[in-house]
Image: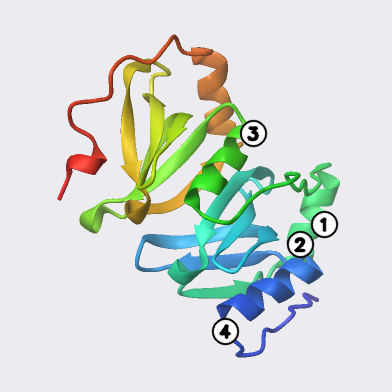
Amino acid sequence: MNTVVPFKARGVRAELREAFAQRIPLRIRRERLQPGAIHGYVVALSRDFCLVAEIGDTLRFDGYVALAIADISALEADPAKEFVEKALALRGESLQVPPSFRLDDWAAIARSAMAQAPLISLNMVEDEEGEISYVGQLVDVEADALILREIDPNAQWYPDTGAYEYEALGSIGFGTGYLDALWQVAGAPGDPQQPRASSLRDHP
């Protein structure tokens, strides 16, 4: 018999605080940004952001994603909570909390993510397409944008850098199996060249 912890109708932040305190696996939806649900545990929380340890379809932990709380349209305690917990335990999967992770703003999140992993994913909201991921290493932080040395899906480094504005950010991810594989194949990049002539900052 599954034991589901129901949430009281107190708002998203209160539900996140309860799930964080009680270590309840969640299904988090952001219908404006992306179809489907993010499945995992809240491992850090601030007034405006939360950090989720994601559970993949294979029922193993697969990295982390930082979300803006304002973008969350709905969340629920995982109805298969007991199964998920037992499956993770039997597979030797333990919940890891990144130390000293800052959730003040996107810049702090990006810096904290880079302190934990060699690559991060900036997931940008682009028109009706939902989130589009740009993977690489953070090389600078500006007043309105993150500067990324990007790597392509074939594990090839771009020779230049791109600027990604905070206002278009949907989430920031790191520590996934896919990102680890990219890093293992690509290795560290050389010195970045000039900024790209066209970047997300130039788009209307």
Q: Earlier in the sequence, mark 3 or mark 1?
A: 1
**Residue 50 point in image, percent of width and height:** 60, 61
- Kind of residue at disc 4: Gly
Q: Which mark is residue 86?
A: 1
Q: Nearest to the eye among marks 3 and 1: give it.
A: 3
Q: Secondary structure at mark 3?
A: helix
Task: State the residue lying farthest toward the bottom.
Answer: 9
Give the total number of marks visible in the rendering.
4
Q: Secondary structure at mark 4?
A: loop
- Kind of residue at disc 1: Lys
**Which residue is nearer to you in this view: 149 or 97?**
149
**Residue 48 point in image, percent of width and height:** 54, 66
**Residue denoted by label 3:** 115
Marks 3 and 2, Cα distance to the nearest angstrom?
33 Å
**Residue denoted by label 2:** 83
Q: Quadrant of residue 149?
A: top left
- Kind of residue at disc 3: Ala
Q: Nearest to the eye among marks 2 and 4: give it.
A: 4
Q: Earlier in the sequence, mark 4 or mark 1?
A: 4
